Amino acid sequence: MANTNPVKVAMIGVGAISGIYLKNITNVFKEVELVGVCDLIPERAEKGVQTVKEYIEAGAKAPVPKIYKDMYEAFNDPEVEVVLNLTRPYEHYGVTKAALEHGKHVFSEKPLAADMEEGTKLMALAKEKNLLMGGAPDTFMGAGIQTARKVIDDGLIGDVIGATCAMIQHGPETWHPDPDFLYKRGGGPMMDMGPYYVTALVQLIGEAVGVTAVTKKSFKERLI
Ligand SMILES: NC(=O)c1ccc[n+]([C@@H]2O[C@H](COP(=O)([O-])OP(=O)(O)OC[C@H]3O[C@@H](n4cnc5c(N)ncnc54)[C@H](O)[C@@H]3O)[C@@H](O)[C@H]2O)c1
């Protein structure tokens, strides 16, 4: 018989992106259960729990998550099976590494790590410990890219000889409440938005054999 127990998850980092995870874990995905949250800023963890409580009051069937005093308390919680890493890119490596070392599977927000070396080390550690690693973006599983997948697989457009993706925007200070991390190590358009487009391309037409890049600094100063 299939195991129907939900997978128990601890959320590390309850910042801007946590809202959609809290909403979907509590209201949509019955396969996962949020057992606890933690943030360096305790009020953010409290606000996250409050959000879940409001969903429960509105009818969601979910437990009220615990608040961990720090990430290590979450990693030492025997109830936790998967650590959900929603910290900033330059923190991903440290948080994911410590979670793996404590025997937890990890799902990380993008980018997996701030550079190739860190990412490769994490994958090796997960393999060595026989743990699973997953990462955003999961957008390739959505209707748009899956439709493109079917169009290619069914031969509707013949041999794919090229593909193009583009994103143009002024910068994250136009919408993110704390955008400074997006100008630090592991940030920038290629690391922040690139994963969505690179993932789509790799999923649809295969892995890259080479990369060429051109860059420029568009504004000397940006106002948060
Ligand atoms: N904001 C978005 O719309 C968005 C969308 C998709 C993906 N993401 C990705 O999600 C990740 C988080 O982005 P965000 O916008 O939520 O950032 P954020 O700065 O709003 O939140 C990050 C939170 O992590 C906490 N944190 C950092 N280290 C911690 C630790 N060791 N223990 C506990 N808490 C810790 C911080 O205190 C902060 O509250 C990034 O990798 C980003 O690329 C964000």
Image (cartoon, grey):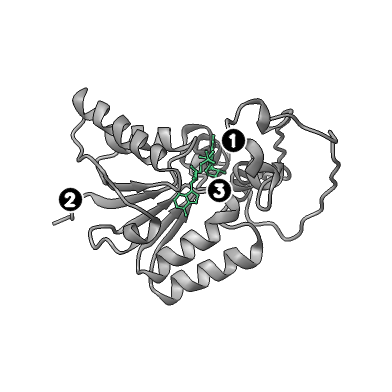
* First reached walking from the N terminus: tag 3 or tag 1: 3
- Residue that appears at 30% across and 64% down: 76
Label 3 element class: loop
Nearest the eye: 145 or 59:
59
User: Which residue matches tag 3?
Assistant: 88
Image coordinates for residue 154, horizontal then vertical, percent: 52, 41
* Label 2, ligand 1: CB separation under 8 Å: no
Image quadrant containing the C terminus: top right
User: Which residue matches tag 2?
Assistant: 4
- Residue that appears at 34% across and 46% down: 37
* Label 1, ligand 1: CB separation under 8 Å: yes
- Residue that appears at 48% across and 37% down: 17
Q: Would residue 106 be found to the left or right of residue 2 on screen?
A: right
User: Which residue matches tag 1?
Assistant: 178
Nearest the eye: 165 or 195:
195
Decide: marks 1, 2 in contact (CB < 8 A)? no
* Label 3, ligand 1: CB separation under 8 Å: yes
The kind of residue tagged 1 is Asp
* First reached walking from the N terminus: tag 1 or tag 2: 2
Image coordinates for residue 43, horizontal then vertical, percent: 39, 37
**What separation in Å lies between label 3 and label 1 (alpha carbons)?**
11 Å
Give the mark toward the camera: 3 or 2: 3
Q: Would residue 185 be found to the left or right of residue 91 on screen?
A: right
Q: How many marks?
A: 3
The kind of residue tagged 2 is Thr
* First reached walking from the N terminus: tag 3 or tag 2: 2
Mark 1 closeness class: few <14, some 14–19, many ≥20 residues within 10 Å: few
